[in-house]
Amino acid sequence: MDEISKSATKSCGPVIKESVIKGNTAVVTFDYAEKLKTKDGKAPTGFWLADDSKEWFPAEAEIKGKTVVLHSDALSKPKYIRYAFTGIPEVNLVNEIDLPAFPFRTDTFKP
């Protein structure tokens, strides 16, 4: 491998790798992020949670390494996650080189 390949710059923002439900929280792990942060220094925004009722609630989010931990007081057992899935989402999650996280959803509900 040549030196250029070894030092290639990332050209992709964080992409969901997996999500795991742990009790009343959901943990989302991302690829393409050595470090997650927000562009404004505040808590991550734009995350929503739902349970089997398919009713969506805004999630409180906290960055922990390459993961974002989510919860909502409105849900005791979240099952589904959406990120940046509104008409004009207000989101702030980026990686270490300030590339924005990609929208995603873990549900397959029909609109």
Image (cartoon, rainbow, N blue to C red):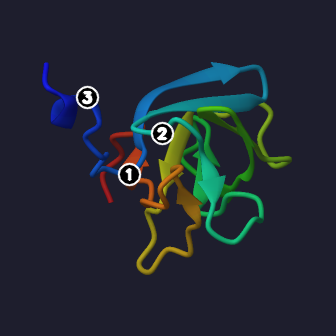
Tag 3 residue: 6
Side of 12 relative to 55 (left or right): left
The CA distance from mark 2 to mark 3 is 17 Å
Q: Earlier in the sequence, mark 2 or mark 1?
A: 1
Dot 3 amino acid type? Lys
Image vertical order of residue 36 relative to residue 103, above or below: above
Question: Which residue is at the far right?
Answer: 73
Q: Is residue 56 visible?
A: no
- Mark 2 — residue? 33
Residue name at image x 43 percent, y 62 percent: 85
Mark nearer the N terminus (2 vs 3): 3
Residue 70 percent coordinates (x, y): 71, 41
Mark 2, other Cα within 10 Å: few <14 / some 14–19 / many ≥20:
many
Tag 1: residue type? Gly
Task: Answer whether labels 2 and 1 touch (C-beta < 8 Å).
Answer: yes
The amino acid pointed to by label 2 is Ala
Q: Residue furthest left?
A: 1
Work out whether 63 lies above or below 24. below
- Where's the N terminus, which quadrant? top left
Q: Residue at x 76, y 59 (%)?
A: 43
Find residue 13 and name its label.
1
Q: Please state the horizontal and vertical placement of residue 51, each as a whole percent of the image.
A: 61, 37
Q: Between residue 60 and residue 15, name the one nearer to us.
A: 15
Identify the residue at horizontal 44%, vertical 54% (top origin): 101
**Of callouts 1 and 3, the N-terminal one:** 3
> Where, by quadrant of the figure, is residue 90 drawn?
bottom right
Give the residue at the far front of this rendering. Answer: 3
Determine whether, in the image, residue 83 is placed left or right of residue 35.
left
Give percent across and percent down for residue 64.
73, 34
Q: Is residue 99 above or below residue 39?
A: above
Q: Residues within 10 Å of mark 3 (few under 14, many from 20)?
A: few
Q: Nearer the viewer, mark 2 or mark 3?
A: 3
